[in-house]
């Protein structure tokens, strides 16, 4: 399963669309559906204790509040709920017992006692013992009444490590282990992930990997080399399923998704041959130039000189831009333009231009920041420099609205709506803050620009958008840390 991808692409690449009830498939943050506060809100003891207080969700539906996982009533309600669901939905193979999407697990004495002493993992405290106590207890009862059904559980965030007190989970439990393989440019990070995967394969009868190829990056995050060695490794440790949050930024990740879909059906395929096939069929007479473009993007990612970090850059455009080397950016932009000039047929020109427009947005986001910082250092004439920056801002936003936001094949979760709005408001606010700082000694020009330039007014207004002031501070700190 790939999420966040156009349905036509899913079908053409033989990826499951979720409509069939495959064995072991069925997961997602779901505990909030078992304990809706409209039904159980008068039992605060059913919900997580945080800082000495029970946190009852304000309304039904998605919530950060977790249940109290050791409360006997919560366990029995879960068993009864799942049994009833299976009786009413005989075609469904798996029920999700995956926790709500937060790290806010219960700290009551009973839950805390189980989790006490668990090692930190990549800077995160772990709640694996309390969570898998709950999973183990519920699953053992369910297998008595529904031996042919499964429950799914996430080894994710604060439950990624194995429980210390459970040697083997019941055979009706499916574990979805989340692993961000994009970070495997760091060999030590990759080895730790593989070690944990092998350990989980001995505890769980049914194991699937949940990976993240997207995470909403606007700048390149391409890693076919990692895909080529990771996917063939998975079946060697008994992995039965692969779920990927793809949410593709097509201008940068096209070859990776093609390679992944082919390898998932046959891990013995030669990755280079598969990529050769994609470049040749997709870009025909411009195949060589497009290969060089994508290989340049991948080099910019794989040559990162830093430790791997889970969810690096998620909803942090300033991190994405800081991690994209300017020389790689400029080289890739030159190569995509050479490819466009090499295209002879209309279909090739259209395909290359589709990629070029997507990369142009990333290029402008990065280049504008480079130029505004250059203006800050006095590298360019102030008036001329501001005119150039304002023009780039206008081009950037026009390109985003016309080529990315309006394109339904770009994953909606990151490239349209509130998430994307927050990213662009930070970018505009950051540009505005630097210009405003530059003009601190030139109040007259500042006032004239406010009066005459709608773009400048837009940049200054973006500085006050909710959350932007803190993001500007974070971006400046991140820049200073990485200079």
Image: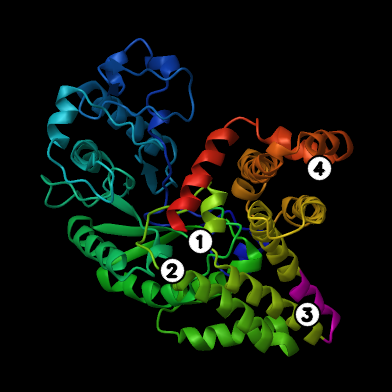
Q: Which residue in the protein does label 4 denote?
A: 455
Point 69% across, 42% down: residue: 432
Point 81% across, 33% down: residue: 447
Q: Is residue 391 left or right of residue 221?
A: right
- 385 w.r.t. 263: above or below: above
Q: Position of residue 180 (x, y in %)?
A: 40, 59
Q: Please, what secondary structure does the residue beneath circle 4 have?
A: helix
Point 70% across, 78% down: residue: 334
Proximity of marks 4 and 1: CB atoms separated by less than 8 Å: no
Give the spatial CA distance, label 3 vs label 1.
26 Å
Q: Is residue 183 left or right of residue 382?
A: left
Q: Which residue in the protein does label 2 denote?
A: 304
Proximity of marks 1 and 2: CB atoms separated by less than 8 Å: yes
Q: Position of residue 201 (x, y in %)?
A: 22, 61
Q: Choose between 406 and 132: the one closer to the eye.
A: 406
Q: Which residue in the protein does label 1 denote?
A: 323
Of the image marks 1 and 2, the number of the one nearer the N terminus: 2
Q: Callout 4 environment at 10 Å: few (<14), some (14 to 19), or many (20+)? A: some
The residue furthest top is: 42
Q: Which residue in the protein does label 3 denote?
A: 340
Q: Callout 2 environment at 10 Å: few (<14), some (14 to 19), or many (20+)? A: some
Per the rendering, the mark at residue 278 is: none
The stretch of residues the image draws in magenta is: 344-353
Proximity of marks 4 and 3: CB atoms separated by less than 8 Å: no
Q: Is residue 346 magenta?
A: yes
Q: Is residue 337 magenta?
A: no
């Amino acid at each position: 399963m790939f999420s966040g991808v156009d349905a036509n692409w899913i079908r053409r690449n033989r990826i499951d669309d979720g409509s069939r009830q495959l064995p072991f498939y069925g997961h997602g943050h779901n505990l909030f559906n078992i304990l809706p506060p409209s039904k159980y809100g008068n039992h605060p003891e059913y919900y997580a204790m945080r800082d000495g207080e029970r946190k009852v969700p304000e309304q039904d539906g998605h919530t950060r509040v977790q249940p109290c996982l050791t409360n006997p009533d919560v366990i029995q309600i879960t068993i009864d709920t799942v049994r009833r669901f299976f009786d009413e939905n005989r075609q469904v193979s798996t029920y999700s017992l995956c926790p709500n999407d937060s790290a806010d697990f219960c700290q009551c004495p009973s839950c805390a006692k189980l989790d006490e002493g668990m090692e930190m993992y990549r800077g995160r405290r772990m709640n694996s013992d309390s969570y898998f106590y709950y999973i183990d207890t519920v699953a053992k009862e369910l297998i008595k009444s529904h031996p042919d059904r499964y429950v799914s559980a996430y080894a994710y965030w604060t439950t990624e490590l194995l429980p210390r007190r459970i040697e083997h989970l019941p055979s009706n439990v499916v574990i979805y282990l989340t692993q961000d393989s994009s970070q495997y440019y760091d060999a030590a990070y990759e080895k730790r992930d593989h070690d944990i995967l092998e350990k989980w394969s001995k505890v769980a009868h049914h194991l699937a990997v949940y990976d993240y190829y997207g995470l909403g990056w606007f700048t390149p995050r391409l890693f076919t080399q990692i895909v080529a060695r990771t996917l063939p490794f998975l079946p060697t440790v008994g992995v039965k399923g692969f779920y990927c949050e793809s949410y593709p930024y097509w201008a940068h990740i096209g070859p990776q998704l093609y390679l992944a879909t082919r390898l998932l059906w046959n891990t013995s395929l030669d990755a280079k041959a598969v990529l050769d096939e994609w470049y040749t069929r997709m870009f025909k007479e411009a195949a060589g130039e497009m290969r060089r473009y994508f290989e340049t993007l991948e080099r910019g990612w794989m040559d990162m000189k830093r430790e791997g970090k889970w969810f690096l850059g998620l909803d942090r455009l300033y991190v994405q831009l800081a991690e994209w080397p300017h020389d790689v950016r400029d080289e890739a932009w030159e190569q995509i333009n050479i490819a466009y000039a090499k295209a002879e047929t209309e279909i090739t020109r259209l395909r290359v231009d589709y990629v070029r427009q997507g990369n142009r947005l990333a290029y402008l986001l990065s280049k504008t920041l480079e130029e505004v910082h250059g203006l800050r250092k006095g590298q360019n004439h102030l008036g001329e420099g501001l005119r150039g920056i304002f023009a780039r801002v206008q081009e950037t936003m026009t390109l985003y609205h016309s080529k990315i936001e309006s394109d339904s094949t770009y994953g909606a979760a990151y490239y349209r709506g509130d998430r994307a709005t927050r990213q662009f408001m930070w970018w505009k606010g950051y540009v505005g803050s630097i210009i405003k700082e530059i003009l601190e000694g030139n109040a007259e020009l500042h006032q004239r620009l406010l009066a005459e330039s709608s773009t400048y007014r837009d940049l200054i207004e973006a500085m006050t958008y909710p959350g932007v002031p803190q993001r500007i501070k974070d971006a400046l700190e991140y820049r200073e840390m990485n200079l």
